[in-house]
Image: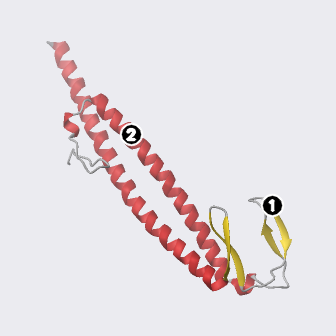
Amino acid sequence: MSSHPQQQGGEQISLDTLTPQQLSAVKKQLDEEVEHLSSSYAQLAAAQTKFKECLRVVRAGDTYFDESKPVMIPLTNSLYVKGHLSDPNRVIIDVGTGFYVEKETKDAATFYEGKVKELAANIQGLEAIVQGKTQNLRLVEEVLRQKVLAQGQGQGQAQQA
C-alpha cells in the first residue's frame, strides 16, 4: 500500500508526514471532490439517457411522425399542446442552451448518436477520475486510522509511566 496519493497537479505528497488534523482536512477535501464528481456523473448519465430517448424517437419516426395523428408539443417542461406535424421528415431539435435547429430525421439521428457517444466518453473518463479519488480517499482514511490508533496507544503508554 502506497501512502502517496496523487494531487490534481500530479504532485505526490507523503501521508506519513501529515498530522491527523492535516489528514482530516485532506479527507474532507477528497470527500467533497468525490461527492461533486459523483453528482456530475449522475447528471451526465441523465443527459445521455435523454439523448438516447430522443434518438429512439427519431429512429422510430415512421410510427411516431404521421401528418394525420396529433402530437403533443412541449411549450415548457410541464405544458404541452396538441399539434400536427407539417412535414414528418423534418424535426426541430434542441442543440443546447435554448437553441433549436430544424433537421431531417436522419440528420437528427446522426446528431443524437454523436451526443450519446460524446457523453459515453465523458462518463467513462469521469468514472476513472472518481475511482482514483475514491482510492485516494480510502488510503487517507487508512493512514488516518493508523495514526489515530498510534496516537491513542502513545497516550496510554504515557499515562502508565
Q: Nearer the viewer, residue 1 or 159?
A: 1
The spot of residue 55 in percent (x, y) is 61, 77
Q: Is residue 129 left or right of residue 160?
A: right
What's the colour scheme? secondary structure
Q: Determine whether 109 is above or below 150 in the image.
A: below
Look at the numbered disc 1 and give the secondary structure of its residue: loop
Q: Quadrant of residue 60?
A: bottom right
Q: Is residue 82 above or below residue 131?
A: below
Give me the residue at 55% from left, 57% from top.
43
Q: CA distance from mark 1 to mark 2?
A: 42 Å
Q: Residue at x 84, y 82 (%)?
A: 69
User: The residue under label 2 is which amino acid type?
Assistant: Gln
Q: Circle 2: is it few (<14), some (14-19), or many (20+) Cα within 10 Å?
A: few
| The disc label shown at residue 29, or none | 2
User: Residue at the spot x=22%, y=42% of the render?
Assistant: 13
Circle 1 sits on which residue?
79
